[in-house]
Amino acid sequence: MSENKAAPIEATNFIEEFINEDLLEGVYSKVQTRFPPEPNGYLHIGHAKAITIDFGIAEKYNGICNVRLDDTNPAKEDTEYVEAILEDIKWLGFKWANVYYASDYFDFIYECAIKLIKMGLAYVCDLSADEIREYRGTLTEPGKESPYRNRSVEENLDLFRRMTEGEFEEGEKVLRAKIDMASPNLNMRDPVIYRIIKNPPHHRTGTKWCVYPMYDFAHPLSDAAEGVTHSLCSLEFENNRPLYNWFLEKLEIKNPPRQIEFARLNLNYTLTSKRKCLKLVEEGIVSGWDDPRMATICGMRRRGYPPEAIIEFCKKIGVSKAYSVVDYALLESCVRDNLNLNADRVMAVLRPLKLVIDNYPEGKTEDVLIEVNPNKPEKGSRAVKFSKELYIEQTDFMLDPPKGYFRLAPGKEVRLKGAYIVKYASHETDENGNVTVVHCTYDPESKSGNTPDGRKVKGTLHWVSVEDAVDATVRLYDRLFNVENPSEADLIENLNPGSLEVLTGCKLESCMKEAKPGDKFQFLRHGYFCVDTDSTENHLVINRTVALKDSFTPKKK
């Protein structure tokens, strides 16, 4: 234990209370955390909470946080996932002190296994995986000892050496800790600490090893080797803590780290199970791990969620020990708040209907000013070209409107955003009776809010000039599932049929010609949108990030 005592910082949650206690008692003189994902898939929103806690705690106590890739199972891991994990952490805005791998400590962990064998606290077992489960017992019945439990130290050392040299096949033998087969904690009933994996080669160590440590063995030893003081993990590892401490105690680790558990993030209408997410990808239900409907960080990035909004969401839900389910609407609210403040405003017509102003001079164009962002007046206004022929939304015109309809209709007039008041004159239809063109007249004295006669117009419509409109495909995304907990439901049956609507022929303001993938905007009266990576120089593809307000309708029970 350290003799240096640090003054505690005001705690805002139980983790910080534990840390303050440790610092005050001189258990540790510094704070060091780590974020230890396994590189066998893509990070999701639950990982974002863990990242925020791990890095946030280190920052608050002026400590360090490392990234440690838990690469102890080469059968499931790949460098693709390593690169994706690091990119996601960086995108969220966090800076690690170092990037480590569990494989950095394989020699040390192996030496610890040898030490346990020599101490009579580990043995080579020939039981199959199914037999080990059968021997383990239940929550109400003690387990049975393996018939190989009392092998001599010499025999165990020889067998473990031969395992390491590749003499045995996968599943033929394992190394188990010798603890207590009658323990009320099933994790303490002689857990497996090493197993044989021959293929594929490890992404970093190649074919050097054919035996690999289990997570429960590698985790505390990697923490100890790295100098971690507080090992923060989600609540499902609470029952593993006695095993974590047992390894550290028996191996006489100096200044052992302290494991502290917090409740994981459970978000309704989402799926974070890697196995089930992989099914969605493999069956083509989604376009990939970065499909904007996925709860992966890369999917949320592609959809246009700002990293600051995700972090703010994690801060709002806080740190707790209690299981709870967070409403997806809270995440969307954080996204709206951020984009409302930061996104530039643009006029976009998603379902275009041509509007012709009959009395507007032929060939004339003029600039009208549109405020770039009302929350950032320093950005000023943008000039938008106004002309005789415009596009408006199909829903902004009705021949027979209901009561309370304040948009364009026979006998009604509206204001065009930043421009003039126009009044319905006539319309054209196709052979099916669908309105294709609306004709109107304008009041030349009504530009930019002027109404010389004092008349009031309730409706204001956005528009795009036909002459310099930018064509785009717009993808309207919503929640992928119609049920609150898709993990416990039939995935296919409970897919939300309205999770994706693709609109072609959309018309955007000319300023969108300069838009690049990742750029974010508020399309007036529609919501917040982001330029997708599928965009090309000749054609924009736009994703709806979130609507202006929550319009999601869950499946009726």
Image (cartoon, rainbow, N blue to C red):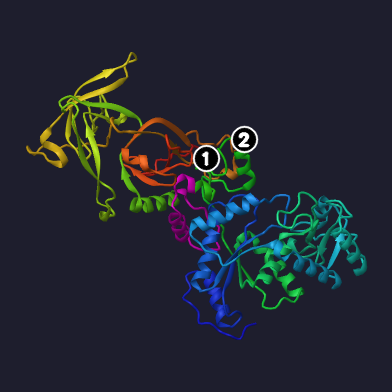
Residue that lies at the very extreme toward the top in this rendered image: 431
* Label 1: element kind: loop
Q: Which residue is mark 1?
A: 481
Horizontal and vertical percent position of residue 470: 35, 34
Mark 2 residue type? Glu
* 3D distance between C-alphas at marks 1 and 2: 16 Å
Residue at 32%, 33% in the rendered image: 469
Residue at 89%, 66% in the rendered image: 157
Residue 243 shown in magenta = no
Q: Which residue is mark 2?
A: 283
Mark 1 residue type? Phe
| Mark 1 or 2, closer to the camera | 2
- Determine the image quadrant of residue 138: bottom right
**Front-lying residue, 38 or 185:** 38
Residue 306 shown in magenta = yes
Horizontal and vertical percent position of residue 283: 62, 35
Q: Which residues are magenta?
A: 301-328
Mark linked to residue 157 = none
Horizontal and vertical percent position of residue 131: 84, 52
**Front-lying residue, 447 or 365:** 365
Is tag 1's residue or tag 2's residue first in the polypeptide sequence?
2
Query: Quick one: label 2, few (<14), some, or many (20+) residues within 10 Å?
Result: few
Q: Is residue 65 left or right of residue 76?
A: left
Query: Quick one: label 1, few (<14), some, or many (20+) residues within 10 Å?
Result: many
Residue 542 versus residue 216 in the image, above or below: above
* Label 2: element kind: loop
Q: Is residue 70 left or right of residue 109?
A: left
Q: Is residue 145 visible?
A: no
